Amino acid sequence: MPDRYVRIQEMLTAKEKYDIKDFENMQADHYMVLTKEWAPLIVKTLSDKKLSRNEKKALSILQEWDFVACSDGIAPMVFHATVNEMVKNSFVVFNSLRSLMAPGRSPWFDDPDTPEVEGLEDMIGKSFREAVAYLNGQMGDNVDDWQWGKLHTLAFFHPFGKSSSLMGYFMNIGPFPMGGSFATANPQP
């Protein structure tokens, strides 16, 4: 994923001298370069569309996002759910999606189940709505409860804890809410 590389390069070229604390911060960094491109596009695409109450709130949170995937953040949850739906709705793997989105059009954005020919904006709108519906079902209909760390977790499993749920109760640790993402310098978990 080039985003991790880009972010690490940004941090390494930000100044001339670094100390231990700087490197600690770099390793714990949860800033998502990818969202600088895609979050504004999602917001722009949906800004003039008719949205439900939760869709409006989720879009507003996405619009105000600082692009950091912290565990208690709502925006990273909305973003990741939307991107997951975009992958499903475009019928391509994630790494191909970026190159298809750059020109703004692709036959992969068209839904073959409809007579219309859908484009990028249609695919984004459909994906966002499906993401909010998914989050409503998984996390409840209160957008304020949609924290990224509730789905993005880390658990430590003891070898004996995997053999039975009773042993697991006593020997496994977690799950713990985690920040980060596949596209951050710190991709935990």
Image (cartoon, grey):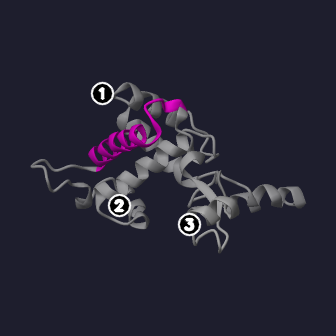
Farthest left residue? Answer: 115
Q: Residue at x 53, y 54 (%)?
A: 34
Report the amino acid beneath label 1: Lys
Seen from the viewer's position, the closer of residues 144 and 26 is 144
Q: What type of secondary structure mainly makes up the magenta span? A: helix
Q: Residue at x 54, y 45 (%)?
A: 76
Q: Which residues are magenta?
A: 120-144
Q: Secondary structure at mark 1?
A: loop
| Residue 167: image location, x then y, percent | 64, 65
Q: Is residue 78 visible?
A: yes
Of the numbered discs in the image, which one, if any, rests on residue 100?
2
Using the image, determine if residue 58 lies above or below residue 122.
above
Q: Residue at x 30, y 49 (%)?
A: 120
Asked if residue 148 lies left or right of residue 26, the reply is left
Asked if residue 104 lies left or right of residue 177, the reply is left
Asked if residue 22 lies left or right of residue 78, the reply is right
Seen from the viewer's position, the closer of residues 52 and 42 is 52
Residue that badge 3 annotates: 2
The span from disc 2 to disc 1 (Cα, nearest Å) is: 26 Å
Residue that badge 1 annotates: 50
The span from disc 3 to disc 2 (Cα, nearest Å) is: 16 Å
Instruction: Give the label, 3 or 1, closer to the camera.
Output: 1
Report the amino acid beneath label 2: Leu
Q: Is residue 187 visible?
A: no
| Residue 133: image location, x then y, percent | 35, 39
Q: Which mark is first along the chain, 1 or 3?
A: 3
